[in-house]
Amino acid sequence: MSDWTWEYLPDAAHVVGGLTPEQRNDIENVAQRVSEAVGVRRIGRPFDITESASGVLSHGDGPVMLWYQEDYRDDVVLILRAHHFNADTLTEGE
């Protein structure tokens, strides 16, 4: 297990606001797996100030699509945008 974590940027309300708790849980599970994978990939790589953050990356897993950045200064994956494709199938009142 790595020391990498993840968080929403700017906050959860802007990134996953309006989704059901189940959909949000799906997104957070994918975010956790992405942060763990980044941590494993970065093992043994020293911090380089010229490489303080990645560009915007994307990752899809099942019905979840994430857009994120890797911040190497703080060992954190910043979730910038998320889309749960099953959210499109909800009808009014569900």
Image (spheres, grey):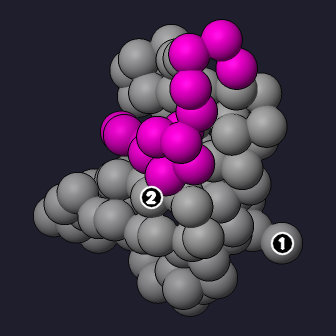
Assess disc 2: are there few (<14), some (14-19) or many (≥20) residues with their C-alpha within 10 Å of its C-alpha. some
Q: What stretch is highlighted in magenta?
A: 74-94
What number is the disc on residue 64? none
Q: x, y percentage for residue 2? A: 75, 68
Residue type, numbered disc 2: Met
Image point 29% across, 64% down: which residue? 57
Identify the secondary structure beneath mark 1.
Answer: loop
Q: Is residue 72 magenta?
A: no
Q: Is residue 19 positioned above or below 43 on the image?
A: above
Image point 57% across, 61% down: which residue? 63
Q: Quadrant of the N terminus?
A: bottom right
Q: Is residue 67 positioned above or below 2 on the image?
A: above
Dot 2 or dot 1, earlier in sequence: 1
Residue picked out by circle 1: 1
Q: Quadrant of the C terminus?
A: top right
In front: 78, or 87? 87
Q: Distance between the residues labelled 2 and 1?
A: 23 Å
In front: 15, or 71? 15
In front: 11, or 41? 11
Residue picked out by circle 2: 65
Q: Which image quadrant is residue 6 in?
A: top right
Mark in front: 2 vs 1:
2
Residue type, numbered disc 1: Met
